[in-house]
Image (cartoon, grey):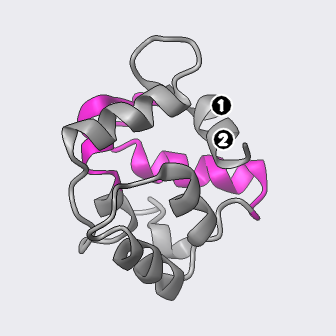
Amino acid sequence: MTAGRMVMTDLLKPEEIKKALDAFSAETFDPRKFFEMVGMKAMTAENVKKVFQVLDVDGSGFIEEEELKFVLKGFSKDGRDLTDDETKAFITAADKDGDGKIGIDEFEALVHE
C-alpha cells in the first residue's frame, strides 16, 4: 500500500463487509445486493467513487475484467474470487457503454440503481 491510499475499511464497516462476504461465500454473487449489504447504497456518490478508486487497482479509471474477478479481495483479503460467469454478469450489469469495462460513473450508477 502506498501512503495516502485509502483502504476499504476507511469507507465501510468491517463487520458489514464480513457479513456480505459470508452471504456470498457459497451463493452466486449479486453486485447490487452485495453493495447494499456493505452499506454502499446509503453512501453519497462521492464516497461510492472513493470505493471505486480502491477497487481500481491499476489506477486506469476503469475496473477491467481482470480486476473485477478479484473485486471481493478489494473489500477484504478473505474475499473469494468471482467465477468467470459472475465476472461477466457483473460487467453486463454495470457496463452501459459496452466498452467491456466499468467506468466510475457506471459503477456509481449500479450502486445507486
Q: Kindly identify the amino acid type of the residue bearing the numbered disc 2.
A: Glu
Residue 97 % position (x, y): 57, 12
State the CA–CA distance, disc 2 to disc 1.
5 Å
Residue 85: x and y, percent?
26, 37
Task: Give the image quarter of residue 104.
Answer: top right
- Identify the residue at image location x=47%, y=67%: 8
Q: Nearer the viewer, residue 74 or 85?
A: 85
If the image is split into quadrants, where does the N terminus sit?
Answer: bottom left
Residue 3 placement (x, y as % from top left): 39, 63
User: Label 2: few (<14), some or many (≥20) within 10 Å?
Assistant: many
Answer left or right for 72 relative to 46: left
Residue placed under numbered mark 2 in the picture: 108
Above-or-below relation of 104 to 17: above
Q: Amino acid at mark 1?
A: Asp
Q: Residue at x 72, y 43 (%)?
A: 113
Can residue 88 be spotted in the picture? yes
Q: Which residues are magenta?
A: 42-71
- Is residue 62 one of those drawn in magenta? yes
Q: Residue furthest front?
A: 27
What label sits on residue 105 in the rendered view? 1
